[in-house]
Image (cartoon, rainbow, N blue to C red):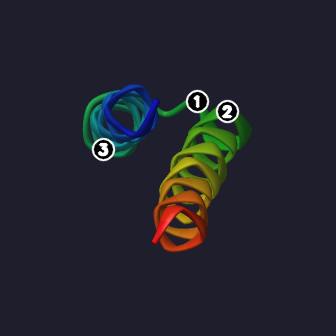
């Protein structure tokens, strides 16, 4: 499950970076960044709970 969360986070961060530097889709870009950060935080929290 952790690897899926990291994969989702990486895809969202890449999408955010592309959106910031290539396109100008303003609001959607920041939503992608927030979703990526939430995915990473959930992965860290769940990994800490497994220990």
User: SS class of the residue under badge 3?
Assistant: helix
Marks 2 & 3, CB-CB < 8 Å contact? no
Q: Residues within 10 Å of mark 1 (few under 14, many from 20)?
A: few
Marks 1 & 3, CB-CB < 8 Å contact? no
Q: Residue at x 52, y 47 (%)?
A: 36
Identify the image quadrant of residue 20: top left
Which residue is under mark 2?
28
Which residue is under mark 3?
17
Residue 24: percent from the left, percent from the top? 49, 34
Marks 1 & 2, CB-CB < 8 Å contact? yes
Q: Residue at x 52, y 62 (%)?
A: 50
1 vs 2, front mark: 2
1 vs 3, front mark: 3
Q: Nearer the viewer, residue 24 or 47?
A: 47
- Gap between marks 1 and 3 measured at Cα: 12 Å
Q: Earlier in the sequence, mark 1 or mark 3?
A: 3
Quadrant location, the C terminus:
bottom left
Which residue is under mark 1?
25
User: SS class of the residue under badge 1?
Assistant: loop
Residue 12: percent from the left, percent from the top? 43, 33
**Residue 33, above or below 12:** below
Q: Residue at x 30, y 44 (%)?
A: 17
User: SS class of the residue under badge 2?
Assistant: helix
Q: Residue at x 46, y 29 (%)?
A: 1
- Residue 38 lies left or right of residue 17; in this view the side is right
Q: Residues within 10 Å of mark 3 (few under 14, many from 20)?
A: some
Say the numbered circle drawn on residue 42: none
């Amino acid at each position: 499950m952790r690897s899926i969360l990291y994969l989702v986070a990486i895809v969202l961060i890449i999408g955010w970076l592309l959106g910031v530097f290539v396109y100008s889709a303003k609001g959607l870009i920041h939503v992608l960044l927030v979703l990526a950060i939430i995915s990473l935080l959930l992965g860290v929290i769940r990994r800490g709970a497994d220990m």
